[in-house]
Image (cartoon, rainbow, N blue to C red):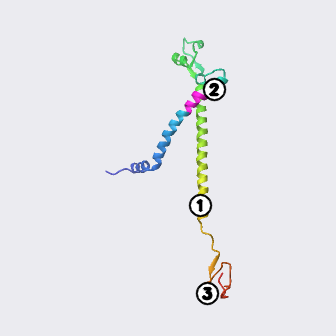
Amino acid sequence: MKKSKTVEEFKKFITKGNVADMAVGIIVGGAFQKIVTSFVNDLVMPIVGLFTGGVNFNDQFAILKLPEGVDAAQVTSLEVAKELGVTTLNYGSFITIVLDFLILALTVFFLVKGINKVKENAEKLKKEEEAAAAPAAPTTKKCPYCCTEIAIEATRCPHCTSELDK
């Protein structure tokens, strides 16, 4: 039985180390998203609520459509609206999710910025080490006639007076 080209390509893809790294990144990212969501919902939004007179942003909504027999005065919260079948625009929840995203994006930005700085410093250090390890340019050479050590710029040997090639 002949394996298809796609199966072979998938096998190569899945056995590369990058897939495992990507999987770990996705799992850690999911866990980090829970931390950010908790940060926004449990720490940021209550403080925002204090500045807005105790308003819980997650419960902010606008009524778009009321079912027959339901009065707008009956809709006192988002939960009640859902129970009564009221069509709502949940802008408070949207604002909270946007804050989640902005905090997550800002955190990832600073994380990538830090990683790039570490890479930059590592590359700079590597270049410095390579420069220090590079052999110094020679300052002397041997006269091909008398084998005496002479200055590299010399055009005539000071010992045997032979003319040297440049």
Residue 133, percent from left and from top = 59, 64
Quadrant of res 164: bottom right
Disc 3, SS: loop
How packed is label 1: few (under 14 Cα within 10 Å), some, or many (20 or more)? few
Which residue type carries mark 3? Cys
Of the residues under marks 3 and 2, which one precedes in the sequence? 2
Q: Which residue is mark 3?
A: 146
Which residue type carries mark 1? Glu
Q: Does residue 117 sit above or below 142 in this rendering?
A: above
How packed is label 2: few (under 14 Cα within 10 Å), some, or many (20 or more)? some
Q: Which residues are magenta?
A: 36-44
Q: Does residue 89 sit above or below 8 in this rendering?
A: above
Of the residues under marks 2 and 1, which one precedes in the sequence? 2
Disc 3 from disc 2: Cα separation: 89 Å
Which residue type carries mark 2? Ile
Magenta segment includes 1: no
Q: Which residue is mark 2?
A: 47
